[in-house]
C-alpha cells in the first residue's frame, strides 16, 4: 500500500459526493474525504489529515471538473454552517439526498427500499421565512452580525445570505449600523456582558408581513428610535418585539416577549388555511415546500373520511388543519403552550370544527387517549430533529394504530424510529422526500407505515 502522509499531493478521481457536500476518493483503497469535491472531478489534492481508516484532503488543482460542478456564488460558502451544495447542480443535490435516505434506511433500519425521487423546490434561494442572526464584535472592534462559522460560535460577517429574502439582510444591516452609531453594547458570550444578542426575523410569504424580534439581555435606552427607523425604512414590517434572555445559554429566545410596535401576530396562508404566527410559533421555514408536503399527505389515499387522526408534535396545527376535511376527526397534541394557543386561534379563524388541540406531553396524552377508548386509526408524527422519544414509540406500540404517517427532517433518527416500529409489527410502505431546505444537507420525508 502507498504511504499516505500529511502534506503529500496526489492526483485523484472523486467517486462519490457525501451529504455534507464533500467528495470521496480512494488512494490504493484508502478513503480520503475532499472538501468541496464533486463526483466526477479529476483533481490534485493535498492530504491535510490522516486517521487510521480514512483521511482528509483539500483541492490544490482541478484538472477536469465534474459535469455536476457549478461556480460558487457565495463568499461565505463552506465557512458558515448553512449551505453544503452551492458548488453542485441542483438536480444532483436531489440525487445525493435520495441516496442518503436510502443508505440510512438500509444501515439503521435494515430496510432496502427505493424511495421516491426528492421533490425539489421551485426556489433554491430566498425561501426561508424565518431566520436568526447572532450579533457580536469583530476582532477590530466593530459591531457585526451574520452567520456562525461551521461547528463554532465565531461569527462570519454576512449581509447577503442567499437562503433568506434579501429584505432580511437589509433589516439586519440597518440594526447593525444603528448599534455602531449609537454605541449600543453587544453581548459577549465570554464575559457575559453587553445587551444585544440576536436578531430574529420572520415573514408571511402570502401577506408580505414581516416580524422583527431583537433578543436582548435588557432593554436599552434608545431602542424606540431604532424601531421607528425600521418601520419607516421597511413598510412591510407589521410588528416589532424584543425578547429578554438573561441566561448564559445557547438557546436563542428567552421566556419574555415585549411588543414595541404593531400587531401580536403576522399572517400567512398554507393549503388555503389562514395562519396566525406569533414570535414563538413553529412554522415550516419553506412555506411552498411545506404546502407540497401537506398535499402529499392529503392526496395519498392513505387517510380516509372515516379516520380519526392523532397529530403528535402538532405545533400550531398546520398539518392537522390542512387534512381535516379529508378525515373524520383530528386531535393535535403539543407540549408548547403558545403553539397550542395559536393552533386554537387558527382553528377558529378557519371555521374548522372537526379538530381539537391538547396541551401536554405526547406520551401522557397517548396513554390518556388509550384509557378513554378513543378509536385511533391513524397516528401522524412530526417530531423534532432528534426524533421520537422511546416512550412515544412504546405508547404507539401499545395503541397499535392501523396506519402511521411520519414527517421527519432527519433520515437518521427516522430510520432509528422505523426500526423500533418495524420490530413492533409494522412495515414500511413508501417514502416521499421533499427538499424543504435546498442547498443545505437537510431533507424532509413523508413516510407511510402500516401494521402487518
Image (tube, rainbow, N blue to C red):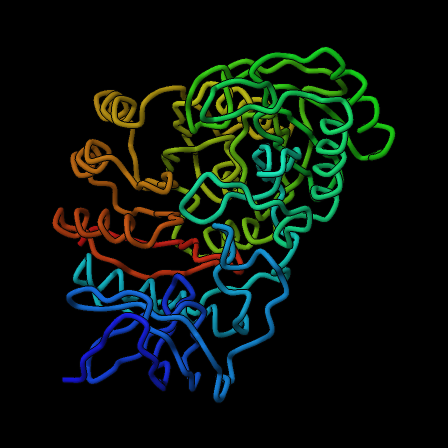
Locate residue 145 relative to residue 98 in the image: left or right.
Answer: right
Locate residue 193 relative to residue 394 in the image: left or right.
Answer: right
Q: Where is residue 5 in the image (x, y as percent from the top left)?
A: 24, 73
- Camera-side residue of 257 and 142: 142
Q: Position of residue 311 (x, y in %)?
A: 39, 35
> What residue is shown at x 54% (from left), y 22% (from top)?
344
| Above or below for 431 versus 235 | below
- Camera-side residue of 207 and 386: 386
Q: Position of residue 216 (x, y in %)?
A: 59, 19
| Above or below for 257 versus 252 | above
Q: Which residue lies furthest to the bottom in this view?
A: 64
> What residue is shown at x 35% (from left), y 76% (from top)?
16
Q: Where is residue 75 in the image (x, y as percent from the top left)?
A: 61, 59
User: Quadrant location of the N terminus?
Assistant: bottom left
- Camera-side residue of 249 and 338: 249
> What is the tally of numbered marks visible in this picture?
0
> What residue is shown at x 54% (from left), y 70% (from top)?
87
User: Quadrant location of the C terminus?
Assistant: bottom left
Based on the displayed image, in which of its 4 quarters is residue 385 positioned? Answer: top left
> What residue is shown at x 35% (from left), y 67% (from top)?
115
Amino acid at each position: 500500500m502507498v504511504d499516505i502522509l500529511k502534506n503529500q499531493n496526489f492526483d485523484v478521481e472523486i467517486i462519490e459526493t457525501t451529504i455534507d457536500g464533500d467528495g470521496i476518493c480512494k488512494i490504493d483503497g484508502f478513503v480520503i474525504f475532499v472538501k468541496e469535491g464533486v463526483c466526477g472531478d479529476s483533481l490534485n489534492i493535498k492530504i491535510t489529515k490522516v486517521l487510521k481508516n480514512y483521511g482528509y484532503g483539500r483541492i490544490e488543482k482541478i484538472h477536469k471538473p465534474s459535469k455536476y460542478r457549478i461556480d460558487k456564488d457565495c463568499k461565505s460558502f463552506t465557512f458558515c454552517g448553512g449551505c453544503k451544495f452551492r458548488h453542485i447542480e441542483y438536480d444532483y443535490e436531489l440525487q445525493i439526498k435520495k441516496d442518503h435516505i436510502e443508505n440510512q434506511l438500509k444501515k439503521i433500519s435494515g430496510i432496502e427500499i427505493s424511495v421516491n425521487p426528492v421533490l425539489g423546490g421551485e426556489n433554491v434561494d430566498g425561501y426561508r421565512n424565518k431566520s436568526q442572526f447572532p450579533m457580536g464584535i469583530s476582532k477590530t472592534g466593530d459591531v457585526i452580525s451574520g452567520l456562525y462559522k461551521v461547528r463554532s460560535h465565531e461569527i462570519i460577517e454576512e449581509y447577503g445570505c442567499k437562503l433568506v429574502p434579501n429584505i432580511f439582510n437589509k433589516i439586519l444591516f440597518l440594526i447593525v449600523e444603528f448599534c455602531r452609531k449609537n454605541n449600543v453594547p453587544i453581548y459577549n458570550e465570554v464575559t457575559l456582558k453587553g445587551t444585544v444578542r440576536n436578531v430574529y426575523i420572520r415573514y408571511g410569504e402570502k401577506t408580505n408581513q414581516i416580524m422583527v424580534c431583537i433578543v436582548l439581555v435588557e432593554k436599552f435606552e434608545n431602542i424606540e428610535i431604532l424601531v421607528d427607523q425600521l418601520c419607516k425604512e421597511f413598510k412591510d414590517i407589521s410588528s416589532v418585539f424584543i425578547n429578554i434572555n438573561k441566561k448564559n445559554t445557547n438557546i436563542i429566545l428567552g421566556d419574555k416577549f415585549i411588543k414595541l410596535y404593531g400587531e401580536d401576530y403576522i399572517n400567512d396562508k398554507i393549503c388555503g388555511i389562514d395562519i396566525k404566527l406569533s414570535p414563538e410559533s413553529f412554522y415550516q421555514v419553506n412555506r411552498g415546500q411545506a404546502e407540497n408536503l401537506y398535499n402529499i399527505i392529503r392526496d395519498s389515499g392513505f387517510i380516509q373520511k372515516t379516520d380519526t387522526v392523532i397529530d403528535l408534535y402538532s405545533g400550531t396545527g398546520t398539518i392537522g388543519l390542512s387534512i381535516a376535511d379529508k378525515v373524520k376527526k383530528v386531535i393535535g397534541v403539543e407540549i408548547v403552550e403558545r403553539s397550542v394557543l395559536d393552533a386554537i386561534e387558527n382553528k377558529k379563524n378557519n371555521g374548522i370544527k372537526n379538530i381539537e388541540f391538547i396541551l401536554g406531553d405526547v406520551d401522557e396524552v397517548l396513554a390518556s387517549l388509550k384509557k378513554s377508548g378513543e378509536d385511533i386509526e391513524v397516528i401522524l408524527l412530526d417530531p423534532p430533529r432528534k426524533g421520537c422519544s422511546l416512550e412515544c414509540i412504546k405508547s404507539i406500540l401499545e395503541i397499535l394504530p392501523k396506519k402511521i404517517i411520519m414527517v421527519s427532517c432527519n433520515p437518521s433518527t427516522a430510520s432509528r424510529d422505523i426500526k423500533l416500529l418495524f420490530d413492533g409489527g409494522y412495515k414500511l410502505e413508501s417514502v416521499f422526500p421533499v427538499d424543504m431546505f435546498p442547498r443545505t444537507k437537510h431533507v424532509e420525508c413523508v413516510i407511510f407505515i402500516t401494521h402487518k
